[in-house]
Amino acid sequence: MGLGDRRARRHEERETFGHGGTARRFQLRQKMISIGDDFWIEDERGERVFRVDGKALRLRKTFHLEDMRGERLCTIQKRVMHIRGTMAIEGPDGDRMALVHKALVSPLRERWKVDVEDGADLRAQGNIVDHEYEIENDDGRKVAQVSKRWFRLRDTYGVEIAPDQNLALVLAVAVAIDEMTHGDD
């Protein structure tokens, strides 16, 4: 990748993720005390747009991402027979959309791999524990940014998603990574 390519990519990222950019912005605010880990995802206007319905008392940790009509967009479910933490994201019909798992070796930064069934694979890297990371596709193009620094409230973080991305899939990836990182707290 030449200097011109990097400069063009940075310019594109600023247009998408910079102040006044075209990225869709969401706020995930988890309830501190809730049965089944239910919480809302709000848009930049503070309006509830998605609900994450955590299913309590299940053998495997399971979440359903639903729209405001209560229709299931996808299911996020922990895989039990895997060596390392893995969560599957399935569509409303039960077809696998993606598999999220922690990278085996990550000496400098935390890294997660997302194997997408019908599209480019994704990877998340940065400070996952502190909710400061980026999600990129295989070409190294940033498709989403997760940050807690935009908010002062505990257990609240933002997700900015490029306009050409599947919102439900990227939000489900953020929920899966959050659960695998902070789920047993």
Image (tube, rainbow, N blue to C red):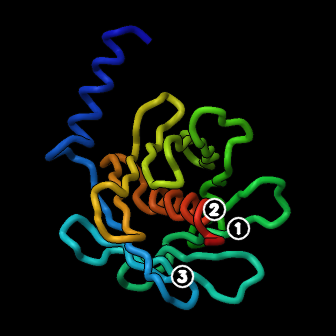
Q: Name which residue type carries label 3.
A: Asp
Residue that numbered label 3 is attached to: 37
Query: How far across and down, in percent of the image, does residue 77 sit?
Result: 66, 69
**Tag nearer the camera, 1 or 3:** 3
Indicate which disc, 1 or 3, sits on the residue closer to the N terminus. Answer: 3
Q: Residues within 10 Å of mark 3 (few under 14, many from 20)?
A: some
What's the distance in space between the residues labelled 1 and 3, CA to CA?
14 Å
Q: Is residue 16 left or right of residue 101?
A: left
Give the residue furthest to the left.
Answer: 20
Q: Which mark is residue 180?
A: 2
Indicate which disc, 2 or 1, sits on the residue closer to the N terminus. Answer: 1
Local SS, label 2? helix
Query: How far across and down, in percent of the image, does residue 174 sit?
Result: 49, 58
What's the distance in space between the residues labelled 3 and 2, CA to CA?
13 Å
Q: Is residue 45 left or right of residue 143?
A: left
Residue that numbered label 1 is attached to: 78
Picture quadrant of residue 51: bottom left
Local SS, label 1? strand
Q: Name which residue type carries label 1.
A: Lys
Q: Residue at x 33, y 52 (%)?
A: 160
Q: Nearer the viewer, residue 58 or 71?
A: 58
Picture quadrant of residue 12: top left
